Amino acid sequence: MADIMRRGLEQEGYAVDITADGAEAIWMATENPYDCVVLDVMIPSADGVEVCRRLRAGSVWTPIVMVTARGDVRDRVRGLNVGADDYLTKPFSFEELVARVRALIRRGSVERPPVLAVADLILDPAQRRVVRAGHEIRLTPKEFALLEYLMHHPDEVVSRTQIREHVWDWQYDGSSNVVDVYVRYLREKIDRPFPNALIRTVRGVGYSIAAR
């Protein structure tokens, strides 16, 4: 799969290095100023999650797309918690991979602290804590996952489809209004009790979270 991806990315105009070893991946990403890293969870020596964790611990902020097995939510959550920027679930289309790589390259290498913050709202993925204006907020696991995804993309509009794919299983019924329902739940807890609302609806597109 790595060889196929390399050939395809080279045809798109990218220079590509590949390795099938986690320890070597850490060395390569530390020593070379890559624009983006596509990282499979299932690699030997150090798995993809550990590679990502060590890179972020070493202040390597190259954008990372994590590739996970279909339906393995735990790997997705672990990857995002240690600093991955995005993920793809196997099987995926090459066109989607290229689109996500391009989007991350446009964003560039930006430091991603382990604790997420938007205005006076703070989310700690490791401790599973959410605090706003000094008040701890209790969220259900799905509410937490939704808020974490939004806070990983501050000031960006994310579609309902993107949210469903990242927070719910791929097989979830796409016609359901579950995203809108959970956004409403979140608003009741992190917006309504406070003077400034952070979650914004972009009609016909999706949602964003931003200090305003």
Image: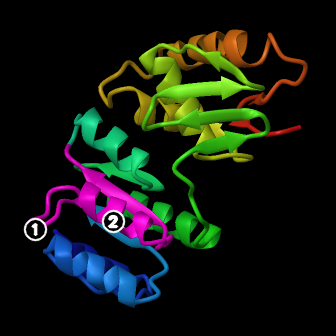
Q: Residue at x 27, y 55 (%)?
A: 49
Q: In the image shown, does 69 or 133 lie closer to the viewer?
A: 133
Q: Looking at the rendered structure, which numbered label has been put on residue 45?
A: 1
Q: In which quarter of the image is the C terminus?
A: top right
* Secondary structure state at the residue bearing disc 1: loop
Q: Looking at the rendered structure, which numbered label has been put on residue 187?
A: none
Write down the residue under mark 2: 54
- Whether residue 63 appears in magenta in the rendering, the answer is yes
Q: Is 57 rendered above or below residue 92? A: below
Q: Residue at x 40, y 89 (%)?
A: 32
- Residue 19's image quarter? bottom left
Instruction: Rate crowding at label 2 as few (under 14), some (14 to 19) or many (20 or more) other CA atoms within 10 Å.
Output: some
Q: Where is residue 115 in the image (x, y as percent from the top left)?
A: 56, 45
Q: Is 117 rendered above or below residue 121? A: below
Instruction: Rate crowding at label 1 as few (under 14), some (14 to 19) or many (20 or more) other CA atoms within 10 Å.
Output: some
Q: Which residue is drawn at 51% across and 38% down?
A: 162
- Whether residue 162 appears in magenta in the rendering, the answer is no
Q: In the image shown, does 24 or 127 lie closer to the viewer?
A: 127
Q: Where is residue 89 in the image (x, y as percent from the top left)?
A: 29, 46
* Secondary structure state at the residue bearing disc 2: helix
Q: What stretch is highlighted in magenta?
A: 40-69
